Amino acid sequence: MSGFISTTPAEQQAMLARIGVATLDDLFRDLPAKHYRPTLDLPPGLSEMEAWQSLRALSETNLDLDRHPSFLGAGAYRHYAPAAIGHLVSRAEFLTSYTPYQPEVSQGTLQAIYEWQSIVCALTGMDVSNASVYDAGTGVGEAARMACALTRRHRVLVLDTVNPSYRDVLATYTSGPGIEVVTVPAWRREGDGTLSRVTDFTPWIDGSVACLIVQQPNFLGWMEQVDGLAAALATTGGILVVVADPVSLAVLRSPGEYGAGIVTAEGKWTGGPVDFGGPLVGMFACRRDYVRQMPGRIVGATVDGDGRPGYVLTLATREQHIRREKATSNICTAEALIALATTIYLCQLGPQGLREVAGQSIAKARYLATEIGRLPGYAVLPTAPWLYEVPIRCPRPAADVNRALLAEGIVGGFDLGQYSPDLADALLLCCTEVTSRADIDRLVRVLRTL
């Protein structure tokens, strides 16, 4: 991409004359005055050193999660990234963002993507993976579009325990093509304040449904009852779509084992920092017979004329990404650099290492739940089995609890009142392998004083 080159006054006047106006003010006359600012009220310029000092001072106002305990998850998770990741992804041959259309000069990038695809298939139990999508949210939208194309239907079911941000992206994706999205309740709050979950979704499934989207574990940290869903959908020709978590797949059955047809997941946290949420990388995989409707790019292994192994973009042609009428989706590229970081992470840890990460996270979350359960006024909401993210009930609004924690230098959990008014007194707390026992004890001490 070329740098920005401003137009000269003479060039501006020539363009204005061509479109028939005299000044820039005339060009933008239709804009309300309150929104039109011909000049920007900017402070005086700074030297490089002054700009660095100013930016450094601003950065110091952020909470450093290496020095402040954090129990915030809700879709973004802190994991330890081995030092080798930063070194390897910084190599010059991986930093180019251009698409590897020319395989003869792109074998390193293509092989890295192929390894990513292989790992995604191994984790999810699917037959085919693509080179990645932008994030798990776009993966959900693409999965719905893909299921509708495969079934030639225009009705999608999604459980209300799927991450609300993903459901927002789904609503955007489906608004254009006229796909109907039906949100299915998967939990309810009883009169005594306890939560109960719904486990039978078969009454919602009929011949008009293209797919059912579930998250495992779900947004509340609970395990969904997934057994039998794929079979129920299969009787009417529908598809089970699963939003997975890569770390949890080290200890849970893969979605392929319980009949999922399409799987998406967020891969950023296995290899990358929380980083204010981005850039992200979405895992996307499916059964072999669905591959022609899969979004994005696919790298395949082959041999050249001399019988040597090599890698190429396969199945999807370049024209599919350029000519809109032939495209199967909006995804025409891949988050290859972030996918590479995740690939290096998963290769370094291996299956046993990933199970260790999951096991430590689960053990620490169990300790957290036990300690909080002993506090007067607090309670774990034991509606369903959970792994390393758990909702707790507070004696006061969760937003107040979070503010009090922040005043003590602790990043609290996700305020579930933002998710549902029925959960205004509930916090979603998360532990990973980087959460220490000292962090948990400190949190509990502060909660005891509130």
Image: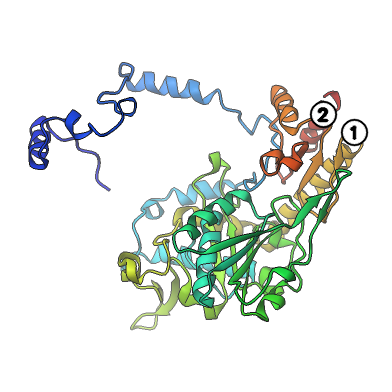
Report if the CB atoms under discs 2 and 1 are less than 8 Å apart: yes
Q: Amino acid at mark 1?
A: Leu
Residue found farthest to the top: 44
Q: Amino acid at mark 2?
A: Leu
**Residue 350 on image: x %, y %:** 65, 61
**Nearer to the camera, 264 or 270:** 264
**Nearer to the camera, 245 or 173:** 173
**Nearer to the camera, 259 or 345:** 259
User: Does 63 sit above or below residue 283?
Assistant: above
Identify the residue at horizontal 82%, vertical 29% (top origin): 447
Identify the residue at horizontal 74%, vertical 64% (top origin): 252
**Residue 435 on image: x %, y %:** 73, 40
Q: Quadrant of the C terminus?
A: top right
The colour scheme applied to this rendered structure is rainbow
Left/right of residue 4 with respect to residue 21 in the rendered view: right
**Residue 97 on image: x %, y %:** 37, 54
Tag 2 secondary structure: helix
Residue, disc 2:
447
- Per the model, the C-alpha gap separating discs 2 and 1 is 8 Å
* Disc assigned to residue 146: none
Left/right of residue 367 with respect to residue 97 in the rendered view: right
Identify the residue at horizontal 53%, vertical 55% (top origin): 171
For label 2, the crowd category at 10 Å Cα-Cα, with few meaning under 14, some 14 to 19 and many 20 or more, is some
